[in-house]
Amino acid sequence: MRRCVDSLLIGGEDVEIIIVDDGSSDDTGAIADAYAEKYPSIVRAIHQENGGHGAGLNAGLNHATGLYFKVVDSDDWVDEASYRQILDALHNLCSAGCMLDMMISNFVYEKEGAKHKSATRYHNILPQGQLFGWEETRNFKIGKYILMHSVIYRTQLLRDCHLVLPKHTFYVDNLFVYVPLPYVKTMYYLDVDFYRYYIGREDQSVNEKNMIKNIDQQIKVNKIMVDAYDLWKIADRHLRHYMMNYLEIITVISTVMLLKSGTEENLEKKRELWTYIKNRDIRLFHKLRNRIMGQTLNLPGKGGRKLSLTIYKISQKVIGFN
C-alpha cells in the first residue's frame, strides 16, 4: 500500500488521493490516516464498514472532487515518468477547452517471479496524440480490451451514467469499465506504460482457484453486464461491436471456470447462465453461442468439456484475463 500511495504522491497538488479503508482489520486505516495527516492538501482517508471492492470504488467516487477519476488498487503502483506525461496531457487538453471523456494508457503485468514483464498496449488499435471517437478505433484483438488498469474516466461522466457497483462482489472492475462506455464520446490514447498491475499472490481474486471459489460473484457480474444495455440499440456500430466482444470474453471466463471446477453443481450453473442470457435476449444468446469460443465451450458431454478446456488452455495466454 505504501508503494502504491508513494507512487501517486509524485503528482503533488494536481491530484487528490482518496484512500478507502473498507473495514480493514490490519494497519490500513492507521496508514491512511498517517498519509492524510502528513499530506492534508493531497490525501483524504475514508473509513467505512467492509463492503468489498465495489463499495470501496463507490466511496471513492462519492468523495472525489477532481475532474478525472482513476482507480489504483493497493497492490499496484504507477510509473513516475508515464504519470508525469499523463498529467501534462490532461493539463494541455483542459487548457485547450477539450471535453475528454476517457483517457487510455498501457499497463504492465508485474507478475511475481516472472523475468519478462508483459505489457498490454493499444498503439495498433487507437490513434495517438489526438482526440478521437469510436468510429476511429480499429478492431480490438483478444487480450487487448480496455481494462480498469488502462482507463481514466471523467468523473462527472461516471456520475451521469449512475455507476453504482454491487457490494461484497469481486470482479466489479469489469462493470466499472463496461457500464460507462455508451456515454463516452471523446477519447485520447497516450502510449506509455503507466499502470503496474501486480499479480501472483495466491489470495488474489483473479487466481484461478479463487475464481472458481468465487464463481457466483463472477456470474453476478456477468448477468449485470447482460442486463446493463440492449446492445442492439447501441447506434455506433464500432462501440456495439466492442461491447459485444467484451461481454463475450466475460461470458467465456464464467463458462470456463464453471467447466474447470468439474462439479455437477457448477455444470448446472453453466447451463443456467446461458439460459439466463437466452431468456434475456435471444439474439444476444445466438450471437455469443455462434462465435468460435461460444461453440467450443458448449460442446456436450465429458468429451466435449475436455476438448473445451484443452482449447481454452491453448488460448488462455492471449485472452488477457489470467
Image: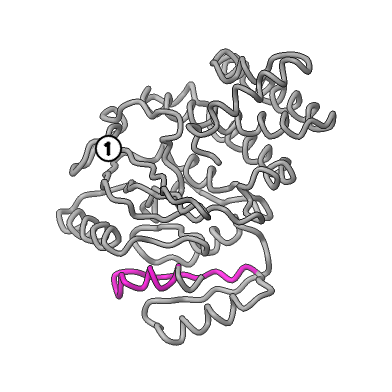
Nearest the camera: 148 or 40?
148
Q: How many marks?
A: 1
Circle 1 sits on which residue? Answer: 123
Q: Is residue 237 magenta?
A: no
Determine the residue positioned at 63% across, 51% down.
Answer: 205
Determine the residue positioned at 33% across, 48% down.
Answer: 105
Q: Is residue 54 left or right of residue 71?
A: right
Whether 198 is drawn above or below 223: the answer is: below
Q: Is residue 311 left or right of residue 219?
A: left
Return the residue found at the far left: 96
Q: Image quadrant of residue 203?
A: bottom right
Return the residue found at the far bottom: 37
Bounds of the magenta span? Answer: 4-22
Percent of width and height locating residue 142 = 45, 29
Percent of width and height locating residue 177 = 47, 44
Q: Image quadrant of residue 124?
A: top left
Q: Image quadrant of residue 12?
A: bottom left
